[in-house]
Amino acid sequence: MSALTSQTALESPPETRQIYEVDCTVKSNTSVNGEYRLLKLDAPQEILDCEPGQFFHLLCPVSGKLQPYFRRPMSIYGYYPEKGELHFLYKIAGEGTSALATLQPGNSLNVLGPLGSGFEINSDWKNLLLVARGVGLATLAPLALEARRKNKQLTAICSARSSDVLMSIDYFRNLGARVITITDEDGTSNIENLRQLIEEQIEDTGIDAMYTCGSNRLLKLLQSIGKQHNIPGQIALEQQMACGIGMCQCCVRPFQRDGNIVQERVCKEGPVFDLQEAIGC
């Protein structure tokens, strides 16, 4: 396949999936709105055996004033084995993502992955709730696709600063999800209103599991609701990391488990963790 110009299988424990280092070819790298861009790669089948919530470590291009040193961890926005495509949705926020924005169709991009552990959907869960804000919706997008594949009912509450930067709305709707949008701009994104929306969802159709990404504010809210109604959940955490494969210990953070505080690596044991075990930082 033309996207695969070099491939190295890295050593990994037998219980984990194979990790690959692969050179992919850029198919497109386009602006979605004023803040976000969608990067589509021509990717070999080997790296498309992914789980929602996993990530890749991207080797950002170096040119001119842009000299990113470390790889950049990037959540998977979409993986499509039938098309041989891997998608990333990103916001230009620093040197690494600024360098990614310079990629043109036909350019090569080295990626390492798939990495980490992903979201789980238990067979007896029917009604799923997804809550995220901004680029966090990129991490949860593959979860919506998996929910569709498993014939689950999904409600997606999508939050943003304003309506023009709301992400993935049409994507979720096209997958059959019920979409609720809230923004700072119209005053609907406050915690009190969000709690009310979730409580109404619990009363109307019930919620079997909740999923979120990143935000400490959302984490604390969903932990509270989960404890009150005995609803399980998972969160995908964001953390600075260097190696992405568990060796450097850069991404270690604390979790509550069985009454104790334990230290785990977000890149290796995560990035998806039990909602009630996560500690905000």
Image (spheres, helix red, strand yellow):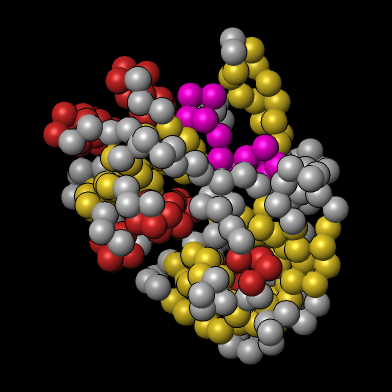
Magenta region: which residues? 266-277
Residue 115 percent coordinates (x, y): 67, 52
Report whether residue 116 is seen: yes
Q: Nearer the viewer, residue 195 or 15?
A: 15
Instruction: Name the outermost residue toward the top.
Output: 259
Q: Quadrant of residue 14?
A: top right
Our reading of the magenta stretch's main secondary structure is loop
Q: Residue at x 60, y 66 (%)?
A: 48
252 above or below 84? above
x%, y% of residue 140? 44, 51
In this view of the protein, which residue sits in the foreground, 89 or 188?
A: 89
Q: Could one spot residue 184 in this view of the protein?
A: no
Q: Is residue 153 left or right of residue 251?
A: left
Residue visible at 37% across and 35% down in the picture: 124
Work out whether 38 lies above or below 76.
below
- Image location (x, y in percent) of residue 126: 30, 40
